Structure formats: C-alpha cells, structure tokens
Image (tube, helix red, strand yellow):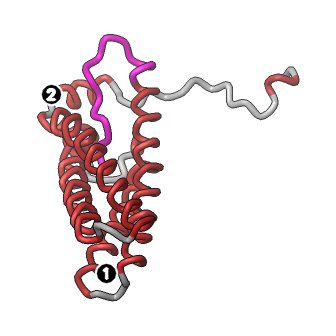
C-alpha cells in the first residue's frame, strides 16, 4: 500500500439505484412531482429567508416573515409526503431506504424544527425574535438536507449513463 492510499476508501461506490429501482423511478409519477416541488420549495425558502432576515435586522415585516415560514413549512410537508410515496414506489418502503437513509434522518430533523415553529407560533410560546431564530435553525437544517440530496443525486447521475432525470430532493 502506497502512502497516497492511506485513509482513502478504494472500494467502488455502490450505485444509488439497482436496474429495477431505476425502472421504477423512471415510471413513477412521483419522480416528476419531486422534480417540481424541490425547486419550488427552494424558491419559497429564498423569499422567506430574505423576509426573516429583514425582520431580524430592521424589525419590519414580521407578519410577512411569519407567514412565509408557514408557507415554507407547508411546502416541506408536501414534499415530505410525496417524497415518502416516491420512496415507496422506488424502494418498497416509505422512509429510510438504505439509499437515502441519512438524507431521511436529516429530513426528520428538518421536519421537527419546522413543526416546532408552527407549534410555537400557534401557542405563542416564543416571542417574535424567538420564532424567527427558530425559523433560521429550521432553514439551516433544510440547507444541509438539500445539499445531501443534491450531492447524492449528482453522484447517481455520474454513475448512470443515459438515465432519466432524478428527483431533486425527495424528502427535504
């Protein structure tokens, strides 16, 4: 073993999809749904992030910022539910298929933080600043989760040739 091989895993990476899973992915109507919802959710996130940051910096627009976080959370719920159905279509289980295990784990944290925001907003347990900081924590985990999916799906695209478009974020 040469020095350059130390600490480097030289095993070939397993493909994200088996041939059968790729066929099921390509045939699933939920693949297109995920491909539409993921960039839509990201656009909602960007607008909301701007509104949340503006409110934190200036104190203005709290109602718009709070409403935008609710819209972002509803988009998250939509992509979570449809992503679970997609995962069932492709991998035979609603969550935690080995190919997306860690992405699904982080998705659970993203979902928990967004849901905590809704609970705090509804119950009034946090003030305006606390709500917005909770939204930022939820958004930080969302960015990590989105990056997980982008990296995973990019690797899958590089591993397969001539396959259809992958969903852009099954559960985030």
Graded by Cα atoms within 10 Å as few (under 14), some (14 to 19) or many (20 or more), the crowding at tag 2 reads some
Residue 38 seen in the current view: yes
What's the mark number on residue 27?
2
Secondary element type, mark 1: helix
Give me the residue at 33% from left, 63% from top: 111
Seen in the picture, residue 105 relative to 11 is either above or below; the reply is below
Residues at marks 2 and 1 touching, judged by CB atoms closer than 8 Å: no
Give me the residue at 31% from left, 53% from top: 95
Secondary element type, mark 2: helix
Q: Is residue 140 left or right of residue 21?
A: right
Region in magenta: 157-172
The quarter holding residue 91 reads: top left
Q: Between tags 2 and 1, which lies in front? A: 1
What's the mark number on residue 31?
none
Q: In x, y percent, where is residue 50?
A: 36, 53
Residue labelled with disc 1:
120
Residue 92 seen in the current view: no
Q: How many tags in the picture?
A: 2
Seen in the picture, residue 114 relative to 147 is either above or below; the reply is below
Task: Tell me the distance, in whole angstroms, between the alpha carbons under discs 2 and 1.
Answer: 40 Å
Q: In x, y percent, where is residue 100?
A: 39, 44
In the orientation shown, which residue stands out farthest toward the left? 29
Graded by Cα atoms within 10 Å as few (under 14), some (14 to 19) or many (20 or more), the crowding at tag 1 reads some
Give me the residue at 24% from left, 47% from top: 83
Q: Quadrant of the N terminus?
A: top right
Q: In x, y percent, where is residue 169?
A: 32, 41
Which is nearer the N-term, disc 2 or disc 1? Answer: 2
Which of the pair 92/130 is nearer the observer? Answer: 130
Q: In x, y percent, where is residue 146?
A: 40, 44
Seen in the picture, residue 52 relative to 24 is either above or below; the reply is below
Give me the residue at 29% from left, 50% from top: 47
Magenta: main secondary structure equals loop
């Amino acid at each position: 073993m040469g020095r350059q091989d130390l600490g480097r895993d030289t095993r070939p990476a397993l493909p994200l999809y088996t041939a059968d899973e790729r066929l099921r992915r390509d045939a699933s109507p939920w693949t297109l749904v995920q491909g539409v919802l993921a960039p839509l959710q990201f656009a909602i996130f960007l607008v909301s992030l701007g509104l949340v940051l503006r409110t934190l910096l200036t104190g203005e627009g709290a109602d718009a910022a709070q409403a935008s976080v609710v819209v972002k959370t509803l988009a998250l719920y939509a992509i979570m539910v449809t992503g679970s159905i997609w995962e069932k279509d492709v991998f035979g289980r609603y969550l935690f298929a080995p190919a997306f295990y860690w992405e699904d784990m982080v998705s659970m944290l993203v979902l928990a933080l967004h849901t905590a925001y809704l609970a705090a907003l509804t119950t009034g347990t946090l003030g305006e600043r606390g709500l917005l900081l909770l939204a930022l924590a939820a958004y930080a985990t969302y960015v990590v989760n989105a990056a997980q999916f982008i990296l995973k799906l990019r690797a899958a695209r590089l591993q397969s040739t001539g396959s259809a478009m992958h969903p852009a974020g099954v559960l985030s």
